[in-house]
Image (cartoon, rainbow, N blue to C red):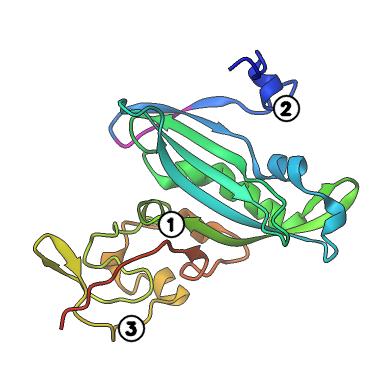
Amino acid sequence: MPNLPKSSKTFLGTSQARYEVEQMKNNIDGKGTFAYFGIANGLQRCVNEKLHKNGIIEIRIHADEAPVTKSGTEHLWILAGKVPFDPDIYKPFEIAIYDSEGKPKTAEIFLRRFIRELNILQQDGIYIGGKHLGVTLKCIVVDTPAWAFLKNTVGHTAIFACERCSVTGEKVEGTTVYPSTNAEERTDDSFRGFQQPEHHHGTSAFLRVVPFLNMVAIFVLDLCIFVVKE
C-alpha cells in the first residue's frame, strides 16, 4: 500500500506518542498489553467547539472484541467514543485498547482509568479552542457479550440474563427461552440493590460513575430475539 506513510506516527496524525503501553492480566492466567488514549484527547482532536451552541458535548461509548487475525487466538478489546451530532460529522475515536489471547481479567481493571477520567470531565468539563464545554455520557452501545462483561452480569444465555426484567428463563433443547413476559421490570434501583443476585457476578465499575448512571437505560442493546413459550 504505497500511499500509506512509512511512519505510524504520521499515519495517526501525531508527532509524539501520547500514551504508554502497560501490562494487564487476562482471564486465562496470562498477560496482555493495554494502551489508554483518553477521552479528553479524543475530544480535543475531533470536536469543533463553535458547533456546540448549548455548551455541552455528549459522548456515546462503544465497546467490542475483535480478532487480530482470522486464524490466530489474539484479540483486541476496544473502548471507543463518538460524539453524536446532527448532522453526523464526527468520527469515532479510540479511548483504550487491550491486546491479548483472552479478555481483561476483570472489567474493573480495564475501565479504571476511563471511569476516573469520565468523572473528572463530567464534573469539570473541558476547554477546546479556548471555550469551556460541559461533558456528559449519553449512552453505552455494546453487544450482549460486551455488556455482560462491562456490567459484571451473567451472559446472555443464562437463565437470569434479561437486561430489562427479572424473568427466569428455562433451557429447552440447549436454548434459553422465557416462559413469561409478565416479570417485574428491572430498574436502576433494583440493579444497584442486587435484588436479583443471580443476575450479577459482582459489582460493576460503572456504579462508580458520578453523577450516577441509570444502569439499565444507559446501555443500548443490540437486536435480541426472545422466544416465549405458549
Answer with left or right where residue 2 lies relative to residue 33.
right
Residue 134 appears in which quarter of the rendering? bottom right
Q: Which residue is mark 3?
A: 184
Q: CA distance from mark 2 to mark 3?
A: 51 Å
**At label 3, which amino acid type do we have?**
Glu
Q: Which residue is mark 1?
A: 204
Residue 181 appears in which quarter of the rendering? bottom left
Q: CA distance from mark 1 to mark 3?
A: 22 Å
User: Looking at the picture, how far across and down is residue 23, in whole percent?
Assistant: 46, 26
Q: Is residue 79 above or below residue 23?
A: below
Within 10 angstroms of label 2, few (less than 14), some, or many (20 or more) residues?
Answer: few
Q: Secondary structure at mark 1?
A: loop
Q: Which residue is mark 2?
A: 13
Q: Is residue 129 above or below residue 217?
A: above
Within 10 angstroms of label 3, few (less than 14), some, or many (20 or more) residues?
Answer: few
Q: CA distance from mark 2 to mark 1?
A: 35 Å
Please tell me whether mark 1 or mark 3 is closer to you in this view: 3
User: Looking at the picture, how far across and down is residue 37, in whole percent?
Assistant: 62, 35
Q: Quadrant of the C terminus?
A: bottom left
